[in-house]
Image (cartoon, grey):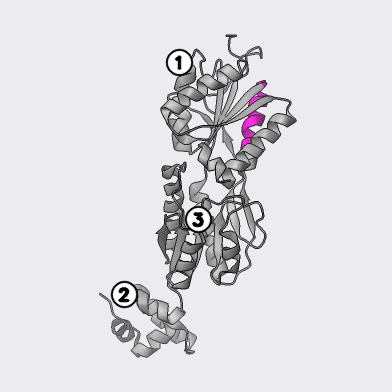
């Protein structure tokens, strides 16, 4: 292992000079600093984490707060977590993953111990009880998600309201007049989870604007629930020809259930979804979808947090524009030129 004395010998300076170059605690000449930095680069020296923390008063650790609550689709959550960890390493930071549902108590425990320099908070609720504490903490934070009142907070996410609207606008443009949203599990809405609620807002607003008959139905994340949902929708909306799905685990079982009930996708029923691209592309009928940009959101959340740690002004709100990718699951409604056959 390369030591600070090896760097000092290679640069022709004392070990204390190398320490000052790393910590900035005492002024050294620019030429000496460059010589030390070149020796560090050539030898591959990495300061001990504890020494760096003492020198900078930082731990170089970020907390990612992502309580794994009921109804959360863990594979998508982990995509966000991986993107945060990857981006943090580019900034020479590690990530402490907090998955327990501890609310304010858990945040305060972590913040009070100086284990972390800053926090990224996920699974944000519209009226999240953690917000007053986040506003009061002496450590910066970034929320992946938008509460109802985001003032004084730094938030980033996909614009889920616009995503719900875009799915409906595409179906309306294809001539569909009766549509439904198959949403997240019921407990997600009971908690007031922000992204799920905003999809409902966008879906409803666009359906009303286009004069469509519509319904919103939460759905448990199981194939049996998907089958029951397909039966319920066709019983309640027999003229249904367009469905938006915001519930990754039921997307494929729901399509299978509709087809078992006599509706072909897309000839009789058009399906759009808000889900990761890899899921939409992998199904027997590739689904027209709006991607969940987990890699971009995670990386930009870390960049925002690094800016806050460095005292750089940051935007309070960052909403990523949704993009819809056409695939084989959508077609003009029956009765529209090129549309499917009547039932």
Q: Disc 3, disc 2: CB below 8 Å?
A: no
x, y percentage for residue 265?
51, 19
Reply yes or no: does residue 146 show up in magenta: no
Q: Is residue 13 visible?
A: no
Q: Please, is residue 302 above or below residue 201 in the view?
A: below
x, y percentage for residue 317?
64, 56
Q: Which comes before the other along the chain, label 2 or label 1?
A: 2
Task: Decide whether the magenta segment is chiefly helix, strand or loop.
Answer: helix
Q: Which secondary structure lies at badge 1?
A: helix
Q: In screen coordinates, is 173 left or right of 325?
A: right
Residue that appears at 42% across and 31% down: 222
State the residue position of label 2.
43
Residues 12 and 76: in front is: 76
- Residue 299, disc: 3
Residues 92 and 215: in front is: 215
Within 10 Å of disc 2 (Cα), the crowding (few <14, some 14-19, many 20+) is some
The magenta stretch is 164-177
Residue that appears at 43% across and 49% down: 68
Mark 3 vs mark 2: give the one in front.
3
Mark 3 vs mark 1: give the one in front.
1
Task: Give the CA separation, mark 2 to mark 1.
Answer: 65 Å
Residue that appears at 64% across and 41% down: 161
Mark 2 vs mark 1: give the one in front.
1
Which quadrant would residue 335 be assigned to in this image?
A: top right
Within 10 Å of disc 1 (Cα), the crowding (few <14, some 14-19, many 20+) is few
x, y percentage for residue 9?
30, 86
Residues 93 and 18: in front is: 93
């Amino acid at each position: 292992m390369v030591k600070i004395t090896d760097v000092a010998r290679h640069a022709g300076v004392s070990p204390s000079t190398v320490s000052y170059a790393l910590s900035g605690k005492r002024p050294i000449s620019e030429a000496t600093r460059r010589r030390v930095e070149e020796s560090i680069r050539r030898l591959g020296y990495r300061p001990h984490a504890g020494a760096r923390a003492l020198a900078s008063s930082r731990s170089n650790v970020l907390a990612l707060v992502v309580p794994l609550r009921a109804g959360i689709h863990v594979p998508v959550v982990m995509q966000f977590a991986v993107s945060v960890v990857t981006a943090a390493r580019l900034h020479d930071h590690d990530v402490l993953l907090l998955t327990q549902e501890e609310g304010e108590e858990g945040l305060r425990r972590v913040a009070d111990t100086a284990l972390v320099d800053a926090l990224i908070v996920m699974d944000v609720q519209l009226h999240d009880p953690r917000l007053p504490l986040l506003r009061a903490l002496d450590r910066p934070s970034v929320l992946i998600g938008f509460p109802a009142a985001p003032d004084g907070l730094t938030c980033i996410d996909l614009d889920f309201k616009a995503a719900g609207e875009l799915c409906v606008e595409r179906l309306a443009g294809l001539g569909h007049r009766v549509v439904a949203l198959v949403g997240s599990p019921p407990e997600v809405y009971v908690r007031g989870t922000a992204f799920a609620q905003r999809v409902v807002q966008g879906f409803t607003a666009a359906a009303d604007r286009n004069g469509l008959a519509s319904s919103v139905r939460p759905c448990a994340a199981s194939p049996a629930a998907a089958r029951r949902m397909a039966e319920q929708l066709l019983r309640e909306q027999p003229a249904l020809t367009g469905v938006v799905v915001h519930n990754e685990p039921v997307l494929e079982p729901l399509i299978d259930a509709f087809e078992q009930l006599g509706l072909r996708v897309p000839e009789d029923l058009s399906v759009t979804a808000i889900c990761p691209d890899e899921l939409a592309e992998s199904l027997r009928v590739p689904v027209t979808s709006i991607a969940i940009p987990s890699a971009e959101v995670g990386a930009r959340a870390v960049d925002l947090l690094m800016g806050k740690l460095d005292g750089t002004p940051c935007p309070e709100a960052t909403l990523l524009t949704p993009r819809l990718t056409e695939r084989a699951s959508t077609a003009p409604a029956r009765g529209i030129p090129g549309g499917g056959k009547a039932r």
